[in-house]
Image (cartoon, helix red, strand yellow):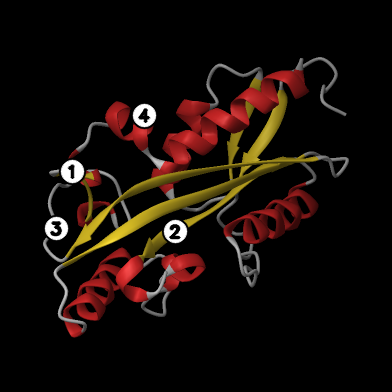
Amino acid sequence: MPKEAGNMKKIVIATKNQGKLREMRAALAMLPVEIVPLDASLPDAVEDGTTFEENARKKAHFYAQATHCAVIADDSGLEVAALGGAPGVHSARFAGHHGDDAANNEKLVRELTARGRNESPADYRCALVFEDTDGTAIAADGRCDGTVRTVPRGTGGFGYDPYFYLDEKSMAELTPAEKDAVSHRGKALRALVRELEVYLA
């Protein structure tokens, strides 16, 4: 059921993270869709999957049922080699409280320091899932490889960006356009947009 009679397709972005919302809104701007932020009063979806895609699918389905709209949901995170792939799917709540960037970054530095490391190979991962009102689902993913360091740089971005380096620049030092070109979410969004262009045609 790709088209909605008489108007653009309404898509709810299933995140309460304003940084993610801005990035997704910009990426989807060329599609014939109306982007709607998630109602902050809605409960959080249960994300108990073992992979990023599994969590994104759970989130998309939960909010499609709750809003009766098409939904795009993401699950993304940081995988650090020196920490055995952690924090992984637990990235947003690494320190115990969902979305506490400062606490999560403090724990990241603490865990690396405890292992005698001041940096480690790492990658950012993103899985995106679109679920329509009829249950049709489309998935896309993206990956960005870099290095995490215990010394932050930059004031842009969000999450672990000040600690995630691409060569000599941290993700938090990139302009929004530079970040979009190389980031895990930028890659996943471009892949999803290509799929949605076909689906919505």
Task: Compare marks 4 and 1 and give the one earlier in the sequence.
Answer: 1
Disc 3 marks which amino acid? Pro
Task: Compare marks 2 and 4 and give the one earlier in the sequence.
Answer: 2
Q: Which residue is mark 3?
A: 152
Q: Is residue 23 left or right of residue 104?
A: right
Q: Residue at x 20, y 73 (%)?
A: 109
Task: Compare marks 4 and 3 and give the one earlier in the sequence.
Answer: 3
Q: Residue at x 28, y 59 (%)?
A: 121
Q: Quadrant of residue 163?
A: bottom left
Marker disc for residue 77: 2
Determine if residue 98 is in view: no
Image coordinates for residue 123, horizontal then vertical, percent: 37, 54
Q: Which residue is mark 1?
A: 167
Measure the C-alpha gap from mark 4 to mark 1: 15 Å
Determine if residue 161 is in view: yes
Indicate the quadrant containing the C terminus: top left, top right, bottom left or bottom right.
Answer: top right
Measure the C-alpha gap from mark 4 to mark 3: 21 Å
Q: Is residue 77 left or right of residue 72?
A: left
The answer to whether marks 4 and 1 mark residues whose Cβ atoms lie closer than 8 Å is: no
Marker disc for residue 3: none
**Mark 3 residue element:** loop
Task: Compare marks 2 and 1 and give the one earlier in the sequence.
Answer: 2
Disc 4 marks which amino acid? Ala
Callout 1: few (<14), some (14-19), or many (20+) C-alpha neighbours within 10 Å?
A: few
Disc 2 marks which amino acid? Gly
Indicate the quadrant containing the N terminus: top left, top right, bottom left or bottom right.
Answer: top right
Marker disc for residue 181: 4
Foreground residue, 132 or 9?
132
Image coordinates for residue 45, horizontal then vertical, percent: 65, 64
Measure the C-alpha gap from mark 3 to mark 1: 14 Å
Q: Is residue 160 left or right of residue 16?
A: left
